[in-house]
Image (spheres, grey):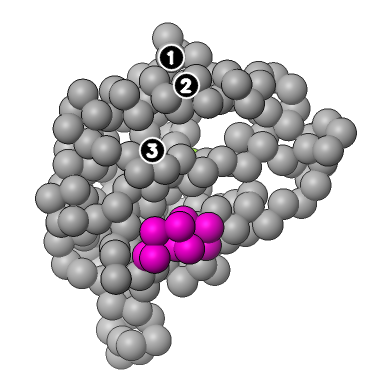
Amino acid sequence: MTRALILDRDGVINEDRGYVHRAEDVVFVDGIFDLGRAARDHGMRIVVVTNQAGIGRLYYSEDDFQALSAWMRGRFLSEGVLIDRIYHCPCHPVHGIGAYRQDSFDRKPNPGMILAAQRDFALDLAASVLVGDRESDIEAGGRAGVGATVLFDPAGEGLASACSARVGALRDAIPLLRAAPQSRRAAPDAPAGCGQNGEPAR
Ligand SMILES: [Mg+2]
């Protein structure tokens, strides 16, 4: 089965400046292309799972989002990295407008988008790696059964987290791709830590 690198978008691929929806506002996070190339070198699929409540709030449209996604995939391709698919959830249970106001199974921390990717690409989620910058990413990964959930925490805020590892730089996640993670069920005696830079927690 196929392993995947499952990426959050805002705060992991691009700096999270709040409802980014135009190419001119995108600043790529240092190391993201290196991380993507490493995943490809390991034969992993790359999928993006991103909450986009800005659509549901009518801050920008589905078309705006799709245009930005196409541009972003083009930038990755120019760096030698194919993004297989970008999944997004436009809904918000409180702030969504009209049909967008719903507690979607796709909206992280719910696992819907990750499970859709699993179906689309026959992913081995237990052997896959998720990188996100929020607890909702980690929780979604855990609920979907992703084997390694990596919290990208450049500010070193040190929040308690159920993540498998914590990195302060995206390049520090590259070694975590190399070590094929094992499913938690298969390795109950080897709990992954959550220390800085992928080191086990003390
Ligand atoms: Mg994020």
Q: Which portion, as a residue range, is magenta?
A: 115-123
Q: Nearer the viewer, residue 154 or 55?
A: 55
Q: Which residue is mark 3?
A: 12
Q: Is residue 32 among what the camera can see?
A: yes
Q: CA distance from mark 3 to mark 1?
A: 16 Å
Q: Amino acid at mark 3?
A: Val
Neighbor class of circle 2 (other Cα within 10 Å; few <14, some 14-19, many 20+) is: some
The answer to whether residue 148 is seen in the rendering is no
Looking at the picture, does residue 58 appear above or below residue 99?
above
Instruction: Tell me which amino acid carries mark 2.
Output: Leu
Tell which circle, 2 or 3, labels the residue nearer the N-terminal end: 3
Q: Are marks 1 and 2 in contact (CB under 8 Å)?
A: yes
Q: Is residue 6 left or right of residue 167?
A: right
Cα distance between the residues tagged 2 and 3: 16 Å
| Crowd tier of the residue under label 3, counting other residues whose Cα lies within 10 Å: few below 14, some 14–19, many 20 or above | many
Query: Any atom of ligand 1 within 8 Å of the CB at mark 3?
Result: yes
Disc 2 target residue: 68
Residue bearing mark 1: 23
Is residue 101 magenta-colored?
Answer: no
Circle 1 packing at 10 Å, graded few (<14), some (14-19), many (20+), is: few
Coordinates of residue 98 in the picture (x, y in percent): 87, 33
Which of the two residues, 163 or 67, is positioned nearer the viewer here? 67
